[in-house]
Amino acid sequence: MKIRVIFLVLIAISHIAVAQQKEFECTEDWIQKIVGLAPEHSEVQPQKARKVLVFDLFTGFDHWVTPHTSQVVKVLGDKSGAYTAEITQDIYCFESGNLKKYDVVVLNNTCSVGPRRDLILDALEKDENLSKEQQKKKAAELEKNLIDYVKKGGGLVVVHGAIVMQNNSMPFSEMVGGSFDYHPPQQEVTLELADIDHPLLKAFQGEAFVHVDEPYLFNKAYEEKKFRPLLYMDTDKLTNKPKPIEGNIRYVSWIKPHGKGRVFYVSPSHNAQSFENPRMLKFFLDGIQYATGDFKCDDTPNL
């Protein structure tokens, strides 16, 4: 009996170790490691010099991977020559005149505070030069600027928790393809390829992969599935689910047109260790090039 108890305790400890990957700072050594792992060349040549804006302000949950992700996006562009990236936390970057300077906006873990879930208003409330009414008006304007930017042909990349940015906004949900609902605790998640022949999944060479992540579940616009799915998980294989999940196939990455623009949503990853996989790096680069308009592929919903 004692042996069995000890065995079960050891299993529990091992599961905790897997689910809680060690956090570490985004050091120059780590960045150079990513430089060595990143693709030498992009899958397609850019049609012109591309500029990418990475916005990584958060007012809600602090994902430790956020600075790592911003540097990954920058490294991928610098090494491949596919684009150049700038990183900012300035909420006024969503002024329409500024957005016109960029081919793609990357929203990196831009989590907002609940239950309001409005990061733009969260940030503007710190501007003492604006009244409460002016803050609300400006917040609505900046959100509309971003949505109009995509509708008119801009690219948008939404990484992991960034889907929470304007989580109660249906126009934002419709643009991105869904809104955050909840997630079970971090655990090993097997991600399957929705279509092994899709060009944006070439990085994975037809094989599923396992990594430690928060298995995100979505609602609002997600229910209509007006996107081209790329990666999915079988929720029957998840553990510690707080409530039953209807339907076992849930998508965690997709692409979609929005007006004349292109949107790439990618839930992986909550942990920087996932970026030490060259396949993940190529997947991110290819997805960003889809958003720029350089990587032409089928993005029509197939459901």
Image: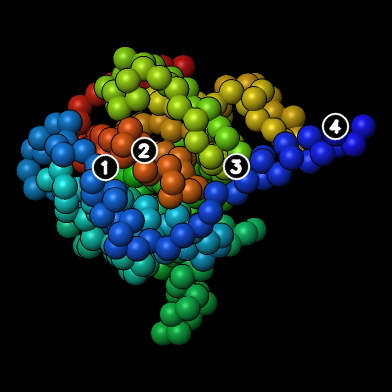
Q: Residue at x 32, y 45 (%)?
A: 156
C-alpha separation, residue under disc 1 versus residue under disc 4: 43 Å
Q: What amino acid is labelled 1 in the image?
A: Leu
Query: Which residue is pictured at 43% across the width and 33% down the height?
Result: 253
- Do the residues bearing badges 4 and 3 touch, measured as CB atoms within 8 Å? no
| Pointers 1 and 2 in contact (C-beta within 8 Å) | yes
Asked if marks 4 and 2 touch (Cβ < 8 Å), the reply is no
User: Quadrant location of residue 29?
Assistant: bottom left
As measured in the structure, the alpha-carbon distance from the residue carrying label 1 to the one carrying label 2 is 8 Å
Which residue is tagged 3? 18
- Disc sitting over residue 277 in the figure: 2
In whole angstroms, how far apart are the C-alphas of marks 4 and 2? 36 Å
Q: Whole-percent x and y of residue 276?
A: 37, 43
- Work out how far the residue at label 1 is from the one at label 3, CA to CA, in angstroms: 23 Å
Q: Earlier in the sequence, mark 1 or mark 2?
A: 1
- Kind of residue indicated by mark 2: Asn
Q: Mark 4 or mark 3, which is nearer to you?
A: 4
In the picture of the structure, the residue carrying the numbered disc 1 is 37
Question: Which circle's residue, 4 or 3, is located before the other in the chain?
Answer: 4
CA neighbours of label 1 inside 10 A, class few (<14), some (14 to 19), many (20+): some
Residue 194 drawn above or below residue 41: above
